[in-house]
Image (cartoon, coloured by chain):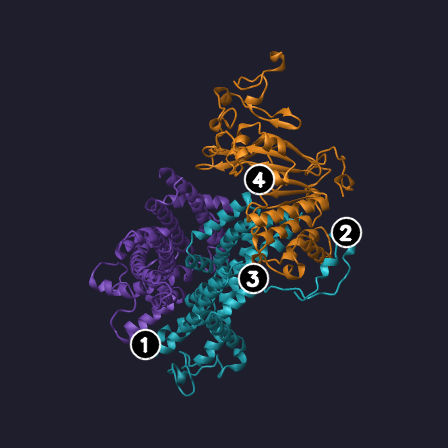
Amino acid sequence: MLTFVGKRLVYVAPVAIGVSIVCFLLVHLAPGDPLSAILPVDATQETIEQMRAAYGFDKPLPVQYALWLWRVLQGDLGTSIATGRPVIGEVGRAVVNSLILASVATLIGFAFGTFFGFVAGYFRNSPLDRAASAIAVFGVSVPHYWLGMVMVIVFSATLGWLPPTGAGPDGSGNWRPDLAHLRHLILPAITMSVIPMGVIARTVRALVGDILSQDFVSALRAKGLGEFGVFRHVVKNAAPTALAVMGLQLGYLLGGSILIETVFAWPGTGFLLNAAIFQRDLPLLQGSILVLAMFFVLLNLAVDILQTALDPRIERG
Amino acid sequence: MSAPVQTASLTAPALPAAAAPAPAPAFERSPGYWGHVGRKLLRDPVAIGAGLVILTIVAVAILSPWITPMDPYRGSMLRRLRPIGDPTYILGSDELGRDMLSRLMVAGRLSLFMGVTPVILAFLIGSAIGIVAGYVGGWLNTILMRTIDVFFAFPSVLLAIALSGALGAGIFNAIVSLTCVFVPQIARVAESVTTQIRQRDYVDAARLSGASSFTIVRVQVLGNVLGPIFVYATSLISVSMILASGLSFLGLGVKPPEPEWGLMLNTLRTAIYVNPLVAALPGLAIFLVSISFNLFSDGLRSAMEVKE
Amino acid sequence: MTPALDPRDRGGPGQPLVSVRGLVKHFPIKKGLGRARAVVQAVDGIDFDILKGETLGVVGESGCGKSTTARLLMGLIPHDRGDLLFDGEAIGGRDLPLRDFRRQAQMVFQDSYSSLNPRMTIEASISFGPRVHGTPARRAIEEARALLARVGLEPARFAGRYPHELSGGQRQRVNIARALALNPRLVVLDEAVSALDKSVEAQVLNLLLDLKEEFGLTYLFISHDLNVVRFICDRVAVMYLGRVVEIGPAEAVLGAPAHPYTAALLASMPSLDPDRRTEEPPLAGDPPNPIDPPSGCRFHPRCAWGEPVCAKEDPALADIGPHHAVACLARQPGAAHSRAPLLEREAA
């Protein structure tokens, strides 16, 4: 097991380096000078040169990358051009908010997804299966930002049950576990949960169908095991994969929440990214994407290790 | 067998001089793999329905400049946000008093173009990368696939937004970003399919016949790998449509006043308290196309699971 | 037509068509983080000749290196060490580039289905090789149909079909036709009839014998079925864990086996003939792991004649009769094995 963890770590390291290179190059992908956003329009050539030197933009790319990576490893993601505050702090606050939303959404999606998946897999090719599968297809096909709008239209604009935007009543960026904040969480979380629900339902349906068609299930039934006993065996066999898919979905939601966070004005990373893009705040853009991608890489690693630990069938060699 | 066996008069190929031109007899022809797939697909009502929806929407979008009931660009401040069922505006009017039906029809052009083009480009580029990596194998495979792994470390929405955020708004940049998102995914599928096919004995038999790698890939490998890659690519169109309109929704794609479903959805957000049904229409269009492509892709996938 | 009349013949009938000398192939397998490497000794130093116009059988249990030998010979996988000569010229060398060699040597694989492209019609598969070598498409198709007729498949019915519409036996006939399409001198048959039903197998074997006569072919016939080998082969090589342990005329090797492994293989063969029952013990257990083969004679842990000396000394192939060689200490004059014949000098 330890050697397996070691192997995964060795495999992840080059990917992490690659991710950092992509994030570093993002700034250089941008048209025009990376400094143009903060330079005054009438800056003299001399000022521009000074600024370039100050930010290290006069050095060759590999040197810039090494310097940048060195600062990143020390926790310095640069300074936001728009606010003048360190990027790491801005991203940190946003990540917490996004994590709350994404986790709740994943849990909801997992609960409904496994339920629909189990029903569909257990009663393969029945009307129940078709209904559950239709819900799954809906989940992966619906534009979630539109679904968010529809939710707002129905539950806020028309029925007036729930607040349409923001994370809390005072518009503050800090989420607290009280009723008012919870009410703000409901709509975005349910909207967001539709994607993992569809994916998990499809996975679980295939898993359950697969397991039920295996010989050992017939053997269990033949030896007189009741349906509940069979169900327990199916759960035990489907759990590792289903949990792994859930873990990955959490990562996707965290990185892909920008559209939903925009619809609901949720003060998370997606909202931050949106602001960074439109204020051409490249350090903030770079920093948020690096943090999110690294989180995703580590989550993948954790899921991989956890799945191997749970599932005796996977070889650890 | 009613047909005369003309080949009985031929001798072995060691003496090819005997292979005189002969009248073509009634040779039996099999429909082939794609014939079987086509027949199976035609028996799948869901796939046919989805296909028809796609065809209709594509046809309407292409023909829209000639068939829209009203000018999709000309608005009227006096007739803003008319409801659905209005005598003049069948599907209502938008926040600038423009006819929703006409705009939805024209918007299909850009939305479909921006959703489908990245998948086509990624299909071409990703297939090429994946097939080369899978067929050549060895260190080239390692380098290509490890590079691809880096892009898998980004959730696709994040990667699309990061790239188009850095490149800046615009149709071209949005298509480039989305292509970059899908190339690694298609390349990975292409690589794994090609690696499997490469181990088949008929590829070895082709090598034994002295054919060059290029000829083997062209004649023996392509026909067997393009099908599965194509099915995978069709399943990406749905995601691509949602992402492309999503970019416009964020203001990273199409710029106003050009109609595009995602952008329309964004500009109508202010209208959800006044006329919610009209505001939701462009999203419904995206959803319809997206789910149709998903259902069609599912049907194609199961139709291709025929015995070979 | 005899092989000597073939215009491509260079060395005359006395020169072996194929000479294999000291052929070695070790497959590296990654362990751990790709540092510590182990090797599978798939083929570990083998020598044999294939004479012009003969059928040489190669037998052995699965995993003994039979198929690897065939693939090495055909250049499908590169060999580590050793010499491969075709009619006196090094395969892949200056005088015989791989592409030229492959016009003269073709192969039929075991899996009749996997060896045909499922997306190509039968005639397209057969005509692929000739077209690669410049035959015009039309003529290649006509020749392919003629070949189909020759292997017993009516062209009008089968030429336009796809592999999955054929039975295993029919597909293997197609594979034979494809191999013949390039008019080769050597055909390697790698378990070519093993997957077929017994009745179909007999038909295909007879077809192979007819074709050999008609086209003046030489066969390398790889099989694990000793009955089939006895039927079709002139000479037999017995392989065990990457080595040839016995080689000689079929009637000698299979009639009076000199190596205990050959004897054990024959003994484990089901026979209804009480006269053919032997007193030799049947083969027990699985072959050892080729990653870490036994020391000395590789067969000694399973050998009924195993003695301590067998774990120390690695026997080489040595002649024991006309064209009959065996690698066993018990057959080597002067060896330390208790059954070893005495050297003539000592006997005298």
Depth check, mark 2 against mark 3: the one in front is 2
Chain A: drawing colour: purple
In the rendered image, which quarter is residue A161 located in?
bottom left
Cβ atoms at labels 1 and 4 below 8 Å apart = no
In the rendered image, which quarter is residue C59 located in?
top right
B208 up-or-down from C330: above or below: below
- Which disc, if any, is residue B273? 1
Name the residue tied to disc 3.
Answer: B33
SS for callout 4: helix
Quick check: do tags 1 and 3 share a chain?
yes
Question: A281 and C5: which one is in front?
Answer: C5
Tell me if B302 is positioned left or right of B83 in this view. Answer: right
- Which disc, if any, is residue B15? 2
Chain bearing tag 4 is: C
Chain bearing tag 2 is: B
Question: A179 and A3: which one is in front?
Answer: A3
Quick check: do tags 1 and 2 share a chain?
yes
Tell me if A4 is positioned left or right of B110 in this view. Answer: left
Q: CA distance from mark 1 to mark 4?
A: 87 Å
Quick check: do tags 1 and 4 share a chain?
no
Chain B: drawing colour: cyan
Residue A305, position in %: x, y?
36, 45
Q: CA distance from mark 3 to mark 4?
A: 39 Å
Residue C12, position in %: x, y?
77, 35
- Which disc, if any, is residue C227? 4
B41 up-or-down from C332: above or below: below
**Sooner in the amino-acid sequence: mark 1 or mark 3:** 3
Q: CA distance from mark 4 to mark 2?
A: 35 Å
Q: Kindly tell me whether residue C250 is visible in this rendering.
A: yes
Chain C: drawing colour: orange
Depth check, mark 1 against mark 3: the one in front is 3
Q: CA distance from mark 1 to mark 2?
A: 86 Å
